[in-house]
Image (tube, helix red, strand yellow):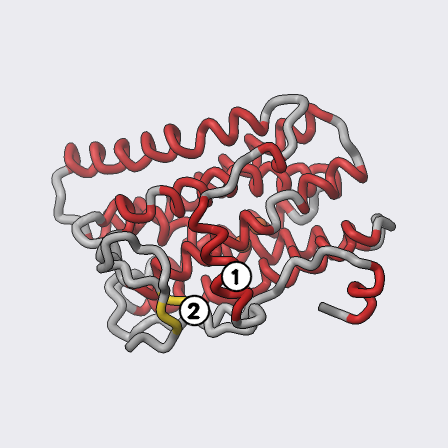
C-alpha cells in the first residue's frame, strides 16, 4: 500500500506478479480427454493479449476524466492486474502456437485488427464494452472456481492454476469498469448493449480459435465434433448466461453478485505472502483442488 493511500484510508486492489511458466512440452489439450474444453479456453486465451491492453488503454484514458480518489485507486489496480494477465496469456499462447498450432498466429492478427477497430469507438462505447465484458467474466469466475473439480481435475497444473488465478483477480476488480461507466455516463441502454457487445465479441473471437484448433488436431467425426462444441456452448449458456441476464437489468450492480468461497482462500493465501508471490499452483490431482496449495516452482 502506498503511503498516500494509507493516509487517505483507501482500499487497494493489489497487483500481483503472474509468474506462471508453461512447460516446453505443454500439450495444447491440457484438460485430459476433453479437447473441446481445452481448446475453448485456448481460443479465449488468444484474445487476451489484445482485449486486456484495450481495457487498460480505455481505463488509462478514463483516469483523466475521474476525480473520485477511491475510484482512481481502483482503476490503477484494474490496469495493473489486467497488464499482468495479458502478459501471462501471451506466454501461454506462444507455447500453444509452438506446440502444434501455428495457425494461431494468423488468428491473432485478426483479433488484433478487431481491437484496433474497437479502439476507434467513443469512450462511452468502449467503457460500456469493458463493463459488459467484466460482468460476463464474473460469471466465468463463479463457474471456473465453483466447478473447478468437474472442469479441471487432473488437468495441467500451470495452465489450470493460471486460469483460476486470473478469474480470482477478475472477481477482485469486478466493480471497477462498471463504476467508471456509471460515474461518467450512467445511461442504461448503452451499458446493456455493452453486456451483449463485450460478451459476444470475445466469445466469438475465442470460438474462431477453438474451431481452428479442433480442426487441426481432433480426429472426431463431424457429428461428434459438433456435439462436443454444442456441449461446451451449452455449459457456457447455463453457467454464465444467468450472470449476463442479471447484468442486463436496469438496476444491476456487480456488488450484488456473491463470491465463491474458494476465492477467499486464494486471497488469504496470497495475502500471507503480502501479495508478492510466488503464485500458488494447485494440485489438480487432489480431491478438493483447494487449500493448502503449493507454491511455485512445482515440486
Ligand atoms: Fe484479466
Ligand atoms: Fe478484468
197 vs 277, nearest the viewer: 277
Mark 1 lies within 8 Å of ligand 1 (Cβ measured)? yes
Judge left or right: residue 24 versus residue 56: left
- The kind of secondary structure element at disc 2 is helix
Asked which quadrant contains residue 228, the reply is: top left
Q: Which residue is mark 2?
A: 91
Judge left or right: residue 256 versus residue 69: left
Residue 289 in sight in this render: yes
Asked which quadrant contains residue 76, the reply is: bottom right
* Rendered residue at 50%/73% (across/down): 277
Write down which quadrant ligand 1 falls in: bottom right
- The kind of secondary structure element at disc 1 is helix
1 vs 297, nearest the viewer: 1
Above or below, 213 relative to 131: below
In percent of width and height, residue 248 lies at: 59, 25
285 vs 292, nearest the viewer: 292
Mark 2 lies within 8 Å of ligand 1 (Cβ measured)? no
Above or below, 238 relative to 46: above
Judge left or right: residue 210 versus residue 175: left
Q: Which residue is mark 1?
A: 86
Amino acid at each position: 500500500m502506498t503511503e498516500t493511500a494509507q493516509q487517505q484510508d483507501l482500499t487497494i486492489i493489489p497487483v500481483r506478479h503472474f509468474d506462471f511458466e508453461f512447460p516446453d512440452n505443454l500439450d495444447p489439450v491440457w484438460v485430459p480427454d476433453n479437447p473441446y474444453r481445452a481448446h475453448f479456453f485456448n481460443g479465449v486465451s488468444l484474445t487476451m493479449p489484445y482485449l486486456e491492453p484495450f481495457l487498460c488503454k480505455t481505463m488509462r484514458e478514463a483516469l483523466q476524466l475521474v476525480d473520485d480518489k477511491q475510484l482512481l485507486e481502483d482503476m490503477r489496480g484494474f490496469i495493473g492486474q489486467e497488464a499482468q494477465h495479458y502478459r501471462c496469456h501471451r506466454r501461454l499462447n506462444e507455447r500453444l502456437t509452438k506446440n502444434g498450432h501455428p495457425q494461431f498466429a494468423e488468428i491473432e492478427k485478426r483479433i488484433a485488427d478487431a481491437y484496433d477497430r474497437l479502439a476507434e469507438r467513443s469512450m462511452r462505447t468502449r467503457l460500456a464494452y469493458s463493463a459488459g465484458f467484466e460482468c460476463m467474466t464474473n460469471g466465468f469466475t463463479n463457474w471456473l472456481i465453483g466447478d473447478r473439480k468437474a472442469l479441471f481435475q487432473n488437468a495441467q497444473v500451470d495452465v489450470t492454476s493460471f486460469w483460476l488465478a486470473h478469474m480470482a483477480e477478475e472477481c477482485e476488480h469486478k466493480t471497477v469498469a462498471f463504476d467508471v461507466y456509471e460515474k461518467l455516463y450512467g445511461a442504461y441502454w448503452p451499458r446493456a448493449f455493452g453486456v451483449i457487445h463485450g460478451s459476444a465479441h470475445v466469445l466469438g473471437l475465442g470460438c474462431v480459435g477453438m474451431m481452428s484448433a479442433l480442426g487441426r488436431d481432433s480426429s472426431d467425426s463431424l457429428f461428434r465434433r459438433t456435439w462436443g462444441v454444442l456441449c461446451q456452448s451449452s455449459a457456457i449458456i447455463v453457467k454464465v448466461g444467468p450472470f449476463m441476464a442479471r447484468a442486463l437489468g436496469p438496476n444491476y450492480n456487480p456488488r450484488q453478485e456473491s463470491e465463491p468461497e474458494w476465492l477467499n482462500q486464494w486471497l488469504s493465501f496470497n495475502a500471507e505472502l503480502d501479495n508478492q508471490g510466488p503464485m500458488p499452483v494447485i494440485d489438480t490431482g487432489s480431491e478438493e483442488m483447494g487449500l493448502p496449495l503449493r507454491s511455485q516452482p512445482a515440486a
